[in-house]
Amino acid sequence: MKKTIRVGLAAALTLCGTLALAQSLNVTLRGGTVDDQVAVDRNYDQMEGRIKRNYRQQPPLVPHSIAQYQIDLRTNQCLGCHDWSKAGERNAPTLSMTHYLDREGRELDQIAGTRYFCNQCHVPQANAPALVENLFQPSIGR
Ligand code: HEC
Ligand code: HEC
C-alpha cells in the first residue's frame, strides 16, 4: 500500500515537472498569447504592379487582392475578368492558351478543368521576409 502511494506520488511529481517545463517552453510562433490581437503586415500588395517572372514556366504572381473573389464548383470570379471572352472589355491579361488545353492536348473554348482552381498555382504578391536564405538566380536577365 505504502509503495503504491510512493509510486503514485513520484508519477504526480514527474507530471508536474513536465507541465512546468512545457509551460516555460511555451513560445508561440506569432509572438503572442492566444487572445492577443497580433497585427500582421499587409500582405497583398496592389501597388507594385506586375512582377517579372523568374523563369519561363512560372505562374505569374497575382498583382491584386484575391480575398473577394470566390472560386468554387459553380462560380469562378477570376474568369469574369481573365477568360478570353471577358478579358478585352475588362482590360485584364487574357489566360494563356495552356489554360485551354485538356489533358490530351485538345484545345477548348472554356477553361480546362486542370486550370480551374487558379490559386493552386497563382499566389498573390506577398510582402513577407524569406523564411530561409534563397540563392535562386533567374535563368534570364543576368
Ligand atoms: C475585376 C477584374 C479582375 C478579377 C476578378 C481578377 N483579376 Fe487578375 N488581373 C486583373 C487585371 C486588370 C490585371 C493586370 C494588373 C496590372 O497589369 O497591374 C490582373 C493581373 C493578374 C495576374 C498577373 C498576370 C501577369 O502576367 O503578370 C494574375 C496571375 C491574375 N490576375 C490572377 C487572378 C486570379 C487568380 C483571380 C481570381 C482569384 C483574378 N486574377 C481575378 C483583373 C482581375
Ligand atoms: C496548374 C497551374 C495553373 C492553374 C490552375 C492556373 N494557371 Fe494561370 N498560369 C500558369 C502558368 C504556369 C502560367 C505561365 C505560363 C503559361 O502561360 O502557361 C500562367 C499564366 C497565367 C496568366 C498570364 C497569361 C499571359 O499570357 O501572360 C494569367 C492572367 C493567368 N495565368 C491567370 C489564371 C487564372 C485566372 C486561373 C484560374 C481560372 C489560372 N491562371 C489557373 C499556371 C496555372
Image (cartoon, grey):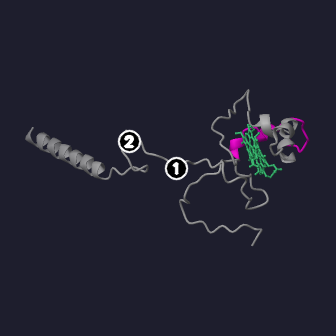
Q: Position of residue 45 (x, y in %)?
A: 63, 49
Number of numbered discs on residues: 2
Query: Does the magenta-highlighted stretch encompass residue 113?
Result: yes
Q: Which residue is mark 2?
A: 36
In the image, taking residue 59 as reference, residue 105 lies left or right, namely right
Q: Determine the residue located farthest toward the left in the rendered image.
A: 2
Which residues fall within the magenta stretch? 102-121
Q: Determine the residue located farthest toward the bottom in the rendered image.
A: 142
Which quadrant of the figure has residue 115? top right
* Residue situated in front as seen by the camera: 1 or 108: 108
Which of marks 1 and 2 precedes in the sequence?
2
Residue at the image position 65 percent from the left and 35 percent from the top: 68
Query: Does the magenta-highlighted stretch encompass residue 110?
Result: yes
The kind of secondary structure element at disc 2 is loop
Dominant secondary structure of the magenta stretch?
Answer: loop
In the image, taking residue 133 as reference, residue 77 lies left or right, namely right
What amino acid is at disc 1?
Asp
* Residue situated in front as seen by the camera: 70 or 19: 70
Q: Position of residue 33 (x, y in %)?
A: 36, 44
Q: Which residue is mark 1?
A: 41
